[in-house]
Structures are given as structure tokens and as C-alpha cells.
Image (cartoon, rainbow, N blue to C red):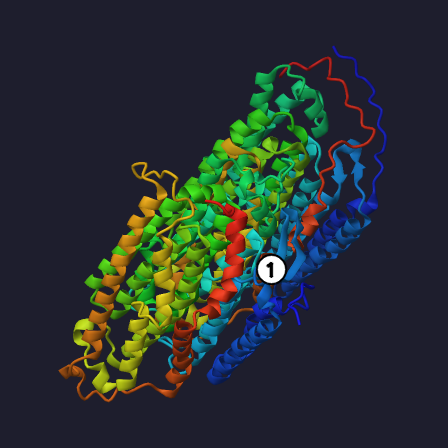
Amino acid sequence: MNLTSGQFWTSPITFAVFLPLIGVLVMLLIPKANEDLHKGIALVASLLTAAVGVVIHTQFEYGDAKTLQGVVDAEWIPFIHSRWIVGLDGISLPMFYLAMFVVPLCIIYSWNHIPHPGNAKAFMILLLVLETGMLGSFIAHDLILFFVFFEIVLLPMYFMIGVWGGENRQYASIKFFLYTLFGSALMIISFLAVFFLTKDAAGLALETFDMRLLTQHGRSIPWATAVVIFGGMFVGFGIKVPIFPFHTWLPDAHTQAPTVGSVILAAVLLKLGTYGFIRIALPILPQAAESWSPVIGLVASIGIIYGALCCLAQTDMKRLIAFSSVAHMGYVMLGIATLTDFGINAAIFGMVAHGLITGMLFFIAGSAKDRYHTLEIKRLGGLLVSAPRMGWILGLSTMASLGLPGLAGFWGEFPAILSAYSPKYPDRATLFFGWSQVVVFRGFMVVAALGTVLAAGYLLWLYQRVAFGTPPEEFADDPNIHDVTPFEWAAWLPMLVGIVVLGIYPNLIFKITNPAVTMVVQNAFGNGG
Amino acid sequence: MFAVEQIPFTTPTLDFHALAPEFVVVGTIVVLVLVDLFTDELSKRVTSAIAGLGLIAALIPVLTLAASDESRSMFGGAYVVDRYSVILKALFLVSGYIVVLMSTHYIGEGDYWEGEYYTLILASVLGMMMMGSSRDMVTIFISLELLSIPAYMLAAWRKRDLDSGEAGMKYYLMGVFATAIMLYGISLLYGFAGTTLLSGIATAIDTGKAQSGVSLAIVFVLVGFAFKISAVPFHTWAPDTYQGAPTPVTAFLAVASKAAGFVALINLVFIAFPGQGTVVRAMLVPLAAITMTVGNLIALRQTNVIRMLAFSGVAQAGYMLVPLAVADLLPPDRADEAMRALLIYLVIYAAMNLGAFAVVISVARRTGSAEIESMRGMFQWAPGMMMALSIFLGGFAGIPPAGGWFGKFVIFKTAMDAGPRVGYFLAGLIAVNSVIAAFYYVRIIWTMVSHSPDDIAQQPLRTPAALRAAVLITSAVVVLTGIVPSLVSRITDTAVIVSTPSAIQVEAPPTTVAPPP
């Protein structure tokens, strides 16, 4: 059976997006004292959403992943020519599944980990609203619809950091908020510019936010204007990713956020930025993307090295993982910067892999914090002795994160580096001393490869200091330090399985993404190059 | 000596259907006065109910007018009831109703005069309703005075309170000053055009004769309304008046009164000065830019919620000036969209602002203060109110799902549509300002969620039903417009300002002018 296009009310995609909100409505009616009931409802809502995901899985025509499936094109805001256009294709599907997959695990993990100051009702409601926002962003094919979903995520995340965060939560949450808001303001201006300036073949203004149409007429905006508009999107999406000069909110937000907040931030929210590049910026402004690509590559490789160096300097485990995100997203951006189908495939795989692995690392950091009440790497040690299973899980996750072949991290990192060997336009001169793109990108490739060495360095060093040796004196007989609990197993096992399975059989994702990516690249940049 | 000439007088034909909403409000005012005369002090509370019911009752003819969908013009085209004015009447009636809901306990418990209070509120609402229909300088002036004079008194309603006296006095003096300037502008325009009818003025001043004088007159008229909408640098009355006035009155001033000012500006810019884009733009573009920037920068430093809302209102007025400023640059077939964008913003802004004030009132019942600090830990002692206020503040900042994003978006869109130079400049400025503004909105949310509450605020907050209803209605409107923006835009899409009334002859300019005394 096909995932057919249909009406708003009968589409399983729309249903999946709004199911968490139905859960929220139910929870609003129940007094907050009933904590277990709230957790239960949230879990059921998110599992049902995942079940709808399974239904979508059975209906999705994988052989035809390059076309948009399950399209709903309904009236939404006629005044501004914005329509409710949603659909899934090979690019959005992995991200859509990832969001559905992570949220129930977060709810399970929170079952007895509701951070201070408690209030399970509010916490769960925020998680479900986040899920709606994330799912919606990945299915939207109308710029304004995308923008709205993209923004819906903002307030719940702000609250999550601001209410349930660590010591320095005010600074971190407001920084996160203002950075993101600035990005969205630039984004919306760029969207409007695209709206007014994109013209059809006859030279008439299209005046549409429909991404499907805009991608077809991507080259109608004059080059100079397009470059400026792309700049707006570059900053807007770049803040979310985050790419190098705009990344400073990330370590603070991650460090202060509650465990589940960090997991969702790392696993899904950052991907909204890179997804925006692949889905919106590149196909809608291909000419500008061609000119910007060396710059993107440059900031990506700076991010890789800078993130890695910062990791080496960290004394806090969570902050270290946060900076490793900057480095990993650098690989994703490098893949995107090549503008090749090979690079973008790698980028999408990298997004999924980073979501699982870094999400997992944040889970472990959170659980370690619960046990040790500190994450200062100097004071930790001997995890393999005091909590051996957790130690091994940490080991597996760090290995995956540093890109060990056979685990998921490898397939995001290695092809991204490889793709920089031959960018889409090898002979074009770049801004950098007029060198051709192939020279510049090979330079980036070397830098990125060096980054993997550094990554191995800081991750192994982290693992060594946290897991090896004997437990330090202050924690030697601490009854608080116990091994993995059943709830933690329930939350972590699916992620670990995902990391291993994707590592062994990466084609699981590549075969979905490849047709769609190939088509996007072909539409935007043609076959040649 | 002048010969006394007999001016033929014909009784104007009244369209009673078209005037029904106004009549209902007038009737309610009469009933209120009578009821107030014959009730004793303890049962004055009934006046609030009567006022509320009267406003709701006036909505019924508004709905039938909306359904009938034809434009009715009266008094030689000076008073027009079209879709645009019907939408505005509904907006003013509902805003007035919510203000009554907010006032019920505040006025009742505060030992203030009740009957007179509601009479004045209704009189002011009546003036606003008339403003939507005014298509003549004289009608505009009468509407403006009808809505302003009760407001001057209401601002000073907290008797024996120096701040309130200051509020009323400042508002009155500034308001009268602005009116004087405006009247001067109107008289100049009448001199050039020979008519007070807006459409007549438009045709008369577009001939290019005496352009410098016309420009001066336009600037005077616009300055008068700039006071009303508290645009910088004519905003100085707003913070003190807002802080000193009773809080429901502040809400009324910040929402309804300001909206009425914008309505007058829409009427003027679109009907009277459509050919004078250069003058209007030269005046309004810098005004919009300065207003939004200064308003936001001052709001950053406020420690009192009401003052902060006042300055944020100043900044929002700056955003709202943008569609008016660029209206003339839009493609001709889309000129109406500037007006509609402004209407959308007015509706959503009214809901957000009224809601925010309602929450502030209900919190102040407990803390007795409107300092931001007094909201510490609201997350624990008033979670519902805290969520509502977060929605409103998020709406101001333009974050979905609150409706504010849509209002801001249509303004962005209008600005971008106006083309590269002015439009992009204003759009960029709004973007920067949005980020500045987000900081102080979020800081309040932060105070509410993260600090531990003070000692006085340990037990949960109890809010009277009327206030709860006000918060509920406004937050429902804000969230619904955020998720399904077409709810508003579908209504405003039908708004067309009817300017040229049928079969109205523009009178010839008077040949003899009486010498000034």
C-alpha cells in the first residue's frame, strides 16, 4: 500500500505530528499531583506517535524514495499565500524517524529522573510539544510552515534549560534563546525575499512559499541578490547547527540543560539547522550555494579543529561532549559544502549517527552526574570497577563517537571526509587566493582527517580518565554508585542497538537517502560540474 | 456686512441598521446612568454587569451588519459603515468587554465610583466605534474627543492617589496639546481643500497647488495622532500615565485607545492622503524607526511590569507604523494589504496586551505591586497565570504558537513587499528590534519560573472569575490565531475601506472667509 497523498484529516503524517499535542491536551486536564499518570500518558502518546511512524514505514514506497510521498496540500493562511504542505521523502524520513525514536526513550529515562525542581506534568508536556515541533519541521514543505514548527521548539527548550537546568541556567537559557531568535529573524527575512524575488519561466513573480515550486525555479534570482539572501539563511541555520563562529551558545546550553534536554538538543534540534541547509538553502538558492560552498567548507573545518581543541581543554565531561558536537557537526557541514550527492548522503548519515551517539553520551553523562554529583573529569575514575556495565556502554559510545569502523559514527565521518576530495565544482576559483575549489577542499579534507585524530585523542583520554583505574577515594564506598538501572536499560538499549546496526549495515539509511539526495543535487546543480 | 444667507437644511436620512451598534451602546449608557442614580452603594456592582451585557448586545447588530455585506454611507459620506469599520467595531466592543471584566473586581474592591466608571468606559468605546466609520475630518475629530475625554478622567480615577492624579493631568495636557496641533492641521487642510470630507481632501490636494502648505498641514495632523499612539518623540506621557492610572484603564489606553489612533491614521493615510505618499513617508518612516528602537531600548531597563508594557507598547506602535509608512510603495493592486496587515496586528496585539494586563492585575491582587521582582516564583504559586503570561510575552516576542508571530510576519511581509530601500531597511530594523525585545520579555518569564517565591506568596493565588475569564478569552484568541492564523486573516481579507461615497458633490471652496477675530 502506498503512502498516498490525501486530505489533512486522513493523512498519517499529520496525525503523527498532532498526536503528541493530543497527549498534552489530556494532561492539561489532570491535576499535577498525579505524577505517574502524567508520565504514563506522555509515554503512551509518544509510543503511539512511534506506532504511526511504523504505519508510515509500511506504507512508504522505499523504491521511490526520491519523490515526496503522502503529500497533503491544504489551505492554511491564504492571506500570505502560505499553505499546509507536508510530505516525506528520503531526506526527511530518517530525521522524522529519529525524532520519533528519541522522544519515547527520553520519557522512559525521565521516569525516575525528573530533575530538580520536579513537576513531572510540566516536564512531560514540554517534551511532547518539542516532539510536535521537531516532527513538523521535518515534514513541512512550505517555508512559513517550516518556520512555525522550527520556532515552536524554541520556548519548550528555553523552559527546559531555564527551569530544570544546572547552576548557571539563566545565562545559558537566555543565550540559547537570543541566539536562536536572531537566527530566525534573519531566516524569515530571507524566506520573504525568496517569496518576492523568485520568478517563473515567464518572468512573473511566483509569490509562493511552496518549497517544491521554489526549488524548480531556484536559479531565477539574480546571483548577487541570491548570495545576500543565502547569507541570511547561512546565519539562521548556522546558529542552530551550530557552525563555528555562532556556536558559543551550545556548550553553555548543553552543560546547563537537564539530561533529557541535552539529549534532545543533540539528537534532533541541531539537525534542524543542517536539514535546513539540505532542504531549503541549497535547492532554493543553488547559485548562491555554489559561491558560498568554499566558505561553508572553511567554517566547517575550522569547527572540526576548534571543537576538538576545545574538547582537549575541558575539565567537565558534559562540556566536553558538547564541544565534540561542534566538531561532529563540522563533518556534516563539510559533507554538505561539497554539494555532491556523496557528501550530502554522508551528511544525513552523520546527522542520524551523531544523534544516536551523542544522545547516548549525554544520557551516560546525566546518569554519571546522578551517581557522582559531579562531572569533573579529574574527580572521576574507575567506572569500570564501580559500575562495569555502564563503563562498557560508555566505552562503546566513545568508540562510536570517534568513528570506529563497524559502529555508526564511522559512516557519517569517513564518507564526509572522502567527499571533500572531489567537490562538485573542482575547477572553480574560490575567494581564497584564487585557488580552485578542488585544491581548497582537499585542504579541508586534510584538516578534517587531522580532526579525527584529535577526536580519538580526546575521547580516549576521556574514557581513560573516567572508566579506567580504581575508583577515587571519595567515591570508593559510595552506595549511590550503582550499575545501570532497568529504566536506563530500557532507554539506552534501543540506541545502542541502533548504533551497532547502522554501523554494520549503513545501507539501511543510504538506500533511503541516496535517491532523494541524487535528485535534489541534480535539480539544483545538474549532472555536470 | 455680510448678508445672512439661508442655508437649506435637509434632515439627514438615518440608516438605523447601520447605526444600531452605536445606539445599543448609547442606550446602555443611559441605562447605566439611571441605574446608578437609583441604587445604593452596596449594589453598585450591578453596573459592571450592565456595561458588559450592553457591549455584548451591541455585538449582535455588528454581526448582522457583517452578514449583510454592503457598505452604507450617511451624512453626506461623513459616516460610512463598511466591512472595515464593522471589523473594528467588533474589535473595540470585545476589547471593551474584556476591560469591563478586568475592572469588575478592581473597581468594586477599590472603593472607586462604579457607575460613572462604566459610563465613561462605554462613552469612550462609543467614540472608538465612531472612529472606524469616520470619513470626514469633523467626524474624526468628534470621535477622537469622545474617546479621549472620558479617558482623561479615567486615568485619574484612583482618587487621593498622587500618581493617578499625575497620570490624568499629564495625559490631559499632552492630549489637549496634540489635539490643538491636529486641529490646526485640519483647519489648514480645510483651507486648501474647501471640504472636510476625506475623499474630497484627497482629490483637492492632489492638484499640486500649494504643496508646501499641504505638506505642513499633513505633518500637523499626523503629529496629532502620533501623540495618541505614543510614537517617539511624542510618547513621554505614556509611561507615567500607564503607571499611575488604574491598571484596567491602562489596559484600555494601551489597547483600545491606541488602536483608535491607528484607525484614524489608516483613514487618513488611505483615504485623505493617498496621493501624498512622499510626505507621509518622509514623516512616518523615521517615526517608525525611532519609535521601535527607542521604545525597546528604554523597555530594557524597566523594573516595573506596567512601565515595561508601556514601553514595549511604544515599540509595537513603531512596528505598526511600518505598513502605513510604506503603503504608498506597494504595488497598486496590493495597497490594501498594508491596511489588512495593520488590522491583523491590531487584533492580535489587542488580545496579547489585554491578556498581559489581566494577568498583571490578578497578580497585583496578591502582591500589591507591579514590580517584576514581585512575580518571583510564580511558577509555583500561580502556574496557570504564569503559563498565560508566558504565552502573551512569547507572542510579543513573535514566537509560535502564540499569535504574535503572525502579526509580526505580516508586517515583515508588507515591508519586504515595499521594495529594496525603505522596505528592507525597516524589515531589518524590526528584526534587530525583535531580538532586543525578546530579551526583556524572556527576562520576565525567567523571573517567574526560576526564582523561589517570596514569603508572602506561599499559598496559591486565587483569582476572581471575571479576571479568569478575561485571561482565558485572550489566551484562547492568542493561541488560536497563532496556530490557525487564517482565523483572523480570513476576516480581515474582506476589509475594504470604502472611501468615495456615492453621489456626493464636493462643495466649492468658500469664497468669502471671515477675518480672524
Classify A391 as above or below A76. Answer: below
Counting from the top left corner in percent of width and height, residue A24 is at: 54, 73
> Which residue lies at the image location 50% right of the left edge and 57% below the top edge?
A517
- Residue closest to the eye, A239 or A51: A51
- Asked whether residue A88 is in view, the answer is yes
In-front residue for pair B225/A155: A155
Identify which amino acid the numbered label 1 is placed on: Leu
Quadrant, the N terminus of chain A? bottom right
Residue A386 is situated, as x and y percent measured from the top left of the image, at 22, 86
Location of the C terminus of chain A (image quadrant)? top left
Towards the viewer: B316 or A174: A174
Residue B189 horizontal/vertical position (percent): 64, 23
Closer to us: B381 or A337: A337
Where B358 falls versus A113 (above or below)? above
In which quadrant of the rendered view does residue A396 lie?
bottom left
Chain letter behind tag 1: A
Find the residue positioned furthest to the top.
B1
Left or right: A359 as drawn, with respect to B185? left
Task: Locate residue A96, reporting x and y percent.
Answer: 51, 66
- What residue sits 25% from the left and 77% below the top? A373
Label 1 environment density (alpha carbons within 10 Å; few <14, some 14–19, many ≥20): many
Give the number of marks: 1
Secondary structure at badge 1 equals: loop
Work out whether residue B383 can be spotted: no
**Residue at (34, 40) in percent of width and height:** A436
A25 is higher (above) or lower (below) than A244: below
Label 1 sits on residue: A68
Image quarter for residue A352?
bottom left
Q: Answer left or right for B141 relative to B320.
A: right
Give the residue furthest to the front. Answer: A528
